[in-house]
């Protein structure tokens, strides 16, 4: 091998080594940069968690924006106060129509009304749609309460029927039996509806979509409010928001959409569902308030006191039923005593005329008195009196 060839080979080897060193340097720089970026993201996440320990973050982008969007100070006068009372929010609940079921002319009218609504906007608004699982518990409670009331009415009618039978008032018995049959039909129909509603409520696929229009008012729009109290600022914000809300409600009416301003309780429910998407299906806001979840201690009644109250209620119900039955029995006993006295008096009157009657007629008269139904005789007498009064 000549000297030139040897130099060329050495040069090639040197070039290869230089390329390898360059590639290694590039890889080291790339890894160092990736490490610096990951350290920066970790620092951002740690800072966000320090500012809001309950906030779970995945990336460093937009960490505070979601939290700031959802946060609020308080609910007052049908408004949501935010940002240390610098922003007030009022919400309009909308109830629309089924657009697909409308005719072409009706659709055109609705579209024209919606265009008119858009033209009336002189301030920014936001549309918010919330989907909830439809709860039928309140409806079931109303059905159950109504069924219990009808059952009580049927029990009272049964007592009235027994009393009317004991008095021999057949007309009242027929009227009460007709009324009882009507109540029983209503009871059967109500129980079938309750059972059907109960089966529907067991399904978790019944969803209800609610649409809201969100209005905002910033105190900076009014000017300098540093000299105003909180109550005065609240009044100013309420006046402005309520005026805007009524303007929108009237404009929505032209598009066949009815709207109402949510009160404070409805706003609390709206926020409760927004913050508790999954748990709100099992525990509603009403359940949470009834259970005093907002308190640090329980204020429920003592267990023994509650049992005592239930026992007293049961005693009152049983005493009422016993009194009704006792009145019926006492009335029947009194009626029986009256019947015996009437028959006894009739026997005495026949004995007074015994000498004027033949033995056969006397015996048959006594037999007829013994077998006579006093109630039928009295009822027949009352009928004759009514006929006589009518003729008069």
Image (cartoon, helix red, strand yellow):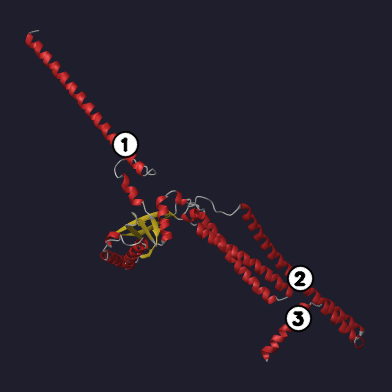
93 or 261: nearer the viewer = 261
- If the image is split into quadrants, where does the N terminus sit? top left
194 or 126: nearer the viewer = 126
Identify the disc placed on residue 42. 1
| In-image side of 296 versus 211 (left or right) | right
**Real-space CA distance between mark 1 and mark 3, rounded to the nearest whole angstrom:** 101 Å
Residue marked by disc 2: 330
Location of residue 388 in the rendering, given as x and y in whole percent from the top left corner: 70, 89
Tell me the element at label 3. Answer: helix
| In-image side of 283 versus 386 (left or right) | left
| In-image side of 334 versus 202 (left or right) | right
Location of residue 129 in the rendering, given as x and y in whole percent from the top left corner: 36, 55
Residue marked by disc 3: 378
* Mark closer to the chain start, 1 or 2: 1
Residue 44 appears in the figure: yes
Kindly report which numbered mark, 2 or 3, lies closer to the viewer in this rendering: 2
Kindly report which numbered mark, 1 or 2, lies closer to the viewer in this rendering: 1
* Mark closer to the chain start, 2 or 3: 2
Measuring 8% from the left and 11% from the top, which residue is drawn there? Answer: 5
Tell me the element at label 1. Answer: helix
| In-image side of 149 versus 249 (left or right) | right
Q: Relative to 380, is 2 above or below?
A: above
Kindly report which numbered mark, 1 or 3, lies closer to the viewer in this rendering: 1
- If the image is split into quadrants, where does the C terminus sit? bottom right
Q: Residues within 10 Å of mark 2 (few under 14, many from 20)?
A: few
Q: Are marks 2 and 3 in contact (CB under 8 Å)?
A: no
Q: Quadrant of residue 330?
A: bottom right
Q: Quadrant of residue 95?
A: bottom left
Q: Which residue sits furthest bottom?
A: 392
229 or 364: nearer the viewer = 229
């Amino acid at each position: 091998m000549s000297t030139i060839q040897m130099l060329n080979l050495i040069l090639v080897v040197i070039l290869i080594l230089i390329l390898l060193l360059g590639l290694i340097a590039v890889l080291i720089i790339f890894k160092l940069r990736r490490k610096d970026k990951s350290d920066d993201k970790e620092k951002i996440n740690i800072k966000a968690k320090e500012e809001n320990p309950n906030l779970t973050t995945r990336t460093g982008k937009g960490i505070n924006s979601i939290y700031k969007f959802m946060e609020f100070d308080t609910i007052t006068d049908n408004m949501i106060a935010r940002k240390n009372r610098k922003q007030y929010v009022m919400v309009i609940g909308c109830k629309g129509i089924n657009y697909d079921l409308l005719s072409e002319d009706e659709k055109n009218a609705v579209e024209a009304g919606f265009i008119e609504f858009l033209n009336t906007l002189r301030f920014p608004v936001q549309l918010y749609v919330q989907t909830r699982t439809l709860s039928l518990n309140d409806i079931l409670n109303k059905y159950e309460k109504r069924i219990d009331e009808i059952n009580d009415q049927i029990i009272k009618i049964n007592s009235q029927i027994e009393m009317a039978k004991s008095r021999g008032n057949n007309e009242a018995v027929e009227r009460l039996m007709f009324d009882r049959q009507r109540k029983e039909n209503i009871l059967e129909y109500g129980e079938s509806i309750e059972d059907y509603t109960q089966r529907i409520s067991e399904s978790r696929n019944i969803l209800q979509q609610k649409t809201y229009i969100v209005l905002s008012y910033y105190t900076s729009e009014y000017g300098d409010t540093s000299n105003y109290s909180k109550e005065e600022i609240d009044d100013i914000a309420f006046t402005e928001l309520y005026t805007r809300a009524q303007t929108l409600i009237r404009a929505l009416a032209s598009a066949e959409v009815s709207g109402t301003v949510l009160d404070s309780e409805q706003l609390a429910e709206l926020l409760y569902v927004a913050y508790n998407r999954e748990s709100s299906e099992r525990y509603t806001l009403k359940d949470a308030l009834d259970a005093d979840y907002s308190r640090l201690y329980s204020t429920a009644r003592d267990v023994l006191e509650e049992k005592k109250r239930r026992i007293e209620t049961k005693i009152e119900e049983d005493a009422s039923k016993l009194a009704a039955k006792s009145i019926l029995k006492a009335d029947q006993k009194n009626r029986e005593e009256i019947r015996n006295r009437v028959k006894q008096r009739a026997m005495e009157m026949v004995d007074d005329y015994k000498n004027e009657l033949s033995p056969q007629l006397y015996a048959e008269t006594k037999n007829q008195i013994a077998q006579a139904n006093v109630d039928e005789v009295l009822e027949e007498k009352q009928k004759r009196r009514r006929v006589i009064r009518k003729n008069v």
